[in-house]
Image (cartoon, rainbow, N blue to C red):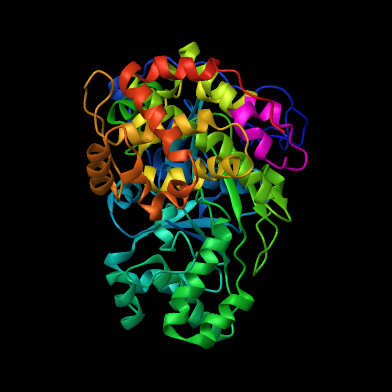
Amino acid sequence: MTQAEILPLPAPRGTAAPVLPSGPIPPATGAAPNVVAAAEILPLTDATLGHHQAQLEVPTYDRSALTPAVVHFSVGGFHRAHQLLYFDELAERRISTDWGVVGVGLRSRTMKDALAPQDHLYTVVERSPDGERARVVGVMVGYHFAPENPTAVLDLLADRRTRMVSLTITDSGYRLDPHTGLFDPDDPDIRWDVAHPTVPRTVFGFIVEALDRRRRSGLPPFSVVSCDNMHRNGDAARAAVVGFARLRDEVLARWIADRVAFPSSMVDRITPHTTPEEREVVARRYGVDDRWPVITEPFSQWVIEDEFSDGRPPLDEVGVRFVPDVGRYELMKTRLLNASHCALGYLGSLAGHASLDQVMEDPVFAAYVTRLMDVEVTPLLPPPEGIDLADYKRSLLQRFANPAIADGLPRLCRRGSTKMPHHLLPSLRQALREDRPHALLTLALAGWLRYLRGTDDSGRPLPLEDALGDRLRALAREGGSDPRPLLAETCVFGDLGSVPGFSEELEEALVALDRDGSRATVAARSLLPTALPR
């Protein structure tokens, strides 16, 4: 790759500022250390960092000097493996201590229970086939479970020092109508927040009340940065925040629309869920008793639109790219990486595979996803500036096949009713509209519909984690190989059911899956001659 193509995870501490690499994904450095004796395993706290620095990288900056300038809603594994590391590098490289982060949880206090006893420190382990690297991240300076103390969260958001609010609330958390893009107020928590603005329950209630307090105090607004995998996530955040504000006060809504920046961003780092077994491995390898470590890959990428309300963090000095428009970068990532995750997750699960690297070890599925990206998706994409899509796709194949991550397929198959409409169906719809090849995209959709019935090709049960799961599963079982009952759910499938001839194409793919199984169907479809894209 050229130097402008992949933004790497910041280099190990003590090195110069990172240079954007050429070639394959950089491997993690070093092999795993020897197993640590149980007596030498110590809790992770500020007081034990001196002990832990012999086994892994620890913060060398003064954590007490960090200014709490970023508030992040919904702190999960991905946020701790991605955005927080970039802010951590700002402090570690002595670039700035002005961008400390405070986390906020809305639904569960589990993260607070994990992080508070260890002074909000946690361990990130980057794994590649060539080794692994572990580091302790120290840039989080606090964490609030909002239902316990909403006043503290509002005070934090209204504080002059807060300049950025970031979100990983998942695409369904924005409460936007999938067809109109407008904010949907029909939710009990939304109605509560409108009636009780000082004790909100939703992220929008907190953001809008805090912005109103800042407006009345003459303070500048903070920027709202969505880090969720969805089309134009900044526009989605704007629509949700302004839409909620309009329920309260039209003047406030206009002030937010005029003054608050909602830059879209593209984020990328494969981060599986940390299991109890992985926690034990981290403890025995590094001697650190971390209640919730994070396991991730070496690759990391963050692209943000250069639009901020009250100053921007100098993240470009640690590998983040600021651009005028993130749209092409977002399309590249969602339609190649996320759509491929969907396709391989469902079809691979039907074939009995458990993890993504297992799927990629099977030459049938490796050939399928390569052809899917090359023949059916890439011709639909406007290339982002400075990106070689052929090299980007090669890097994706490497990342998918990383056995050190072993990304579980159940994670990829969660929330299909929101992921598929955002990631895969737009390519399918565009290919149909432009009369381009789409057999492999159609097969990916058929794989999801077959997955919804709840068993794999051998009759083993499949997990279903989806807000619409019960309804979709009932429709999938009712229709069998006939996709029309499911396609009638326009809130998920849009107008696909009315595209002439498409229901028949999809039914043919479902019949093949039922008759031949996933692997044989994938093999047959991947070998079919395909006309070159126009």
Can residue 10 be seen here? The reply is yes
Please check the rendered image and state whether residue 390 is part of the magenta-colored stretch, yes or no.
yes
Residues drawn in magenta: 373-393
Q: Residue at x 76, y 37 (%)?
A: 4
Q: Horizontal and vertical percent for residue 41? A: 33, 27
Q: In the image, 324: left or right of 220? A: right
Q: Horizontal and vertical percent for residue 232? A: 58, 56
Please check the rendered image and state whether residue 340 is part of the magenta-colored stretch, yes or no.
no
Residue in the foreground of this view, choosing between 497 and 211: 497
Dominant secondary structure, magenta: helix
Q: In the image, 427: left or right of 50? A: right
Q: In the image, 471: left or right of 181? A: left
Q: Residue at x 49, y 65 (%)?
A: 180
Q: Residue at x 55, y 17 (%)?
A: 528
**How many callouts does the rendering have?**
0
Q: Is residue 248 above or below residue 390?
A: below
Residue furthest toward the front? 500
Q: In the image, 327: left or right of 369? A: right
State the quadrant of the C terminus.
Answer: top right
Can residue 130 be seen here? The reply is no
Q: Residue 43 occupies which quadrant of the picture? A: top left
Residue in the foreground of this view, choosing between 431 and 331: 431
Q: Horizontal and vertical percent for residue 111? A: 33, 49
